[in-house]
């Protein structure tokens, strides 16, 4: 160290001065005092020597402590560190290097660097190191590069290496900092695999941050919604809301997310162009290492075909296939609901029971195929004449019925019956033989005429037969007087 050299130089000068002073005093005094001077000289010289030795010991201790500190720092470094001379031999290796490559310290010191490199890379590496040492200059750590290293057991591992060069006592050395990147490579491979899976899966995948702002999605999601990545990033999933779900639905969804960290169910979304998309959606919360939610991941499965099949099954179960009107089962379900609603809200609910006049002649003269066409035509006409809140149904054969909801006055049912009669009056004339079609309509009201589904239908049916027996082509409202007249 420079201060030690200065100290030794200064001490030598002081000793020289002391000796010179004593030499002058030696020759200038009597012989009897020379012994005393000599003793004093030895004492002073010894004292100075002891002082010098004490300083040297302390200096060496400090040097050893500094060396130990450096060794501790090097051995506690997270990277493997190797010091290499011009001959490409390792002259020093830290603890991490020994652990990484599987050699002991004694085994590593003296190894050539090429022993730690797979054979197929050795020639290239020798050329690189030779050029680096040929520059004969100190350099800071260069940009780290990814290489393959070879352990004592012959296993190749991916590493990242950075090199620096230093000159010590005229000799140039290379310092290699080597980092094990196996975990990083595994993580990168996993991310690449997940990215590939995400892009190639047929399900739409959407990722948001903890504030539910969209941060990523796959191509399938973009194709399904019609939005580009640029249009979606930064937006909230509410951009896709169809309006088919109310606030209670979304409240239940987020309550499940808070309680369980996931939710699964059906959601109808709206495409960019306006079309609706039925999806089975699975949403999961992703938390970081501290347990704080960082992202939400939603997987969308298209259930359009399932919904279409359900619709077809519902049509088969609840609708007449010939006319497209509600069938008897759906009619009874809706009539029960209508009576219940009328009971709560007040007003009236009416049933129009309809039997076609002249239909038997069509079947007898023109055949069942033409008869089916007449029934289908009746279905189309009834769909046009009823209001949106009403239900038209085919009860069976040539019998039909209409549920009239939310009537304020009983006469409203009569007005509707007149309109229906007008729509259902037409002529069938396929081959020049005109066959008239009309209807007999019976009207019954809840709660005036009946207080149950079965009784209301029976009253409407009685009114229809009364109309049929008194000239057909008309409508008749149920009354007790009508029943009494029929009995006579």
Image (cartoon, helix red, strand yellow):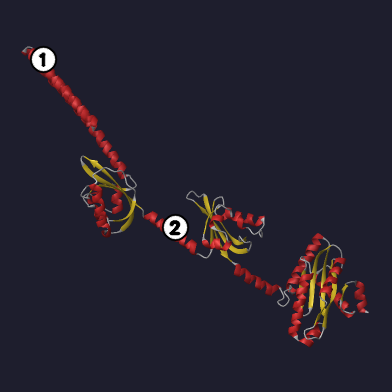
Q: Quadrant of residue 443?
A: bottom right
Using residue 93 as the reference point, say whether residue 288 is left or right of it: right
Picture coordinates of residue 4, whole percent (x, y): 22, 30
Secondary structure beneath dot 2 equals: helix
Q: Write the residue at 77% across / 69% down.
A: 391
Using residue 22 as the reference point, say whether residue 436 is left or right of it: right
Picture coordinates of residue 81, whole percent (x, y): 29, 47
- C-beta proximity under 8 Å, tags 2 and 1: no
Q: Quadrant of residue 73?
A: top left
Task: Point out the image quarter for the C terminus.
Answer: bottom right
Answer yes or no: is residue 383 visible. Answer: yes
Q: Residues within 10 Å of mark 1 (few under 14, many from 20)?
A: some
Q: Nearer the viewer, residue 391 or 249?
A: 391
Residue that lies at the very extreme toward the bottom in this rendered image: 365
85 vs 478: above or below: above
Label of residue 191 in the image: 2
Q: Write the residue at 62% across / 68% down.
A: 307
Q: Quadrant of residue 450?
A: bottom right
Residue that lies at the very extreme toward the front in this rendered image: 432
Picture coordinates of residue 51, whole percent (x, y): 20, 25
Picture coordinates of residue 123, whole percent (x, y): 24, 57
Residue that lies at the very extreme toward the top in this rendered image: 30
> How many marks are shown on the rendered structure?
2
- Marked residue nearer the N-terminal end (2 or 1): 1
Q: Nearer the viewer, residue 106 or 87?
A: 87
Using residue 291 as the reference point, say whether residue 327 is left or right of it: right
Q: Which residue is mark 1?
A: 25
């Amino acid at each position: 160290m420079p201060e030690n050299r200065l100290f030794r130089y200064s001490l030598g000068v002081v000793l020289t001065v002391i000796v010179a002073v004593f030499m002058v005093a030696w020759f200038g005094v009597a012989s009897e005092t020379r012994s005393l001077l000599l003793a004093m000289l030895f004492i002073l010289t010894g004292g100075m020597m002891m002082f010098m030795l004490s300083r040297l010991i302390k200096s060496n201790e400090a040097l050893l402590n500094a060396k130990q500190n450096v060794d501790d720092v090097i051995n506690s470094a997270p990277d493997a560190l190797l010091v290499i001379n011009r001959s490409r031999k390792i002259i020093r290796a830290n603890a991490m290097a020994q652990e990484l490559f599987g050699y002991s310290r004694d085994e590593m010191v003296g190894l050539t660097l090429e022993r730690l490199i797979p054979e197929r890379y050795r020639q290239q590496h020798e050329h690189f190191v030779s050029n680096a040492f040929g520059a004969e200059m100190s350099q800071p750590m260069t940009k780290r590069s990814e290489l393959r290293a070879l352990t004592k057991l012959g296993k190749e591992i991916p590493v990242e290496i950075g090199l620096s060069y230093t000159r010590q006592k005229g000799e140039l050395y290379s310092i290699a900092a080597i980092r094990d990147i196996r975990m990083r490579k595994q993580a990168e491979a996993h991310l690449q695999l997940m990215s590939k899976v995400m892009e190639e899966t047929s399900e739409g995948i959407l990722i948001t941050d903890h504030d539910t702002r969209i941060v990523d999605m796959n191509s399938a999601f973009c194709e399904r919604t019609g939005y580009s990545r640029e249009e979606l990033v930064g937006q909230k999933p509410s951009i896709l809301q169809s309006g088919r779900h109310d606030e209670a639905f979304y409240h239940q969804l987020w309550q499940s997310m808070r309680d369980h960290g996931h939710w699964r169910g059906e959601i109808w979304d709206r495409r960019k162009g306006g079309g609706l998309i039925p999806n089975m959606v699975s949403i999961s919360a992703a938390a970081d290492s501290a347990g704080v939610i960082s992202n939400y991941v939603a997987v969308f499965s298209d259930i359009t075909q399932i919904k279409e099949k359900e619709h077809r099954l519902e049509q088969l179960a609840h609708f007449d296939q010939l006319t497209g009107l509600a069938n008897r089962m759906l009619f009874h379900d809706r009539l029960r609901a209508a009576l219940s609603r009328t009971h709560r809200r007040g007003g009236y609910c009416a049933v129009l029971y309809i039997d076609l006049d002249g239909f038997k002649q069509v079947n007898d003269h023109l055949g069942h195929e033409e008869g089916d066409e007449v029934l289908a035509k009746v279905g189309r006409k009834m769909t046009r004449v009823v209001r949106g809140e009403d239900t038209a149904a085919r009860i069976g054969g040539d019998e039909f019925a209409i549920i009239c909801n939310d009537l304020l006055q009983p006469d409203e049912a009569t007005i509707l019956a007149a309109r229906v009669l007008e729509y259902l009056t037409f002529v069938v004339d396929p081959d020049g033989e005109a066959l008239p079609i009309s209807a007999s309509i019976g009207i019954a009201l809840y709660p005036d005429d009946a207080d149950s589904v079965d009784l209301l239908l029976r009253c409407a049916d009685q009114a229809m037969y009364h109309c049929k027996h008194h000239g057909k082509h008309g409508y008749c409202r149920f009354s007790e007087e009508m029943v009494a007249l029929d009995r006579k």
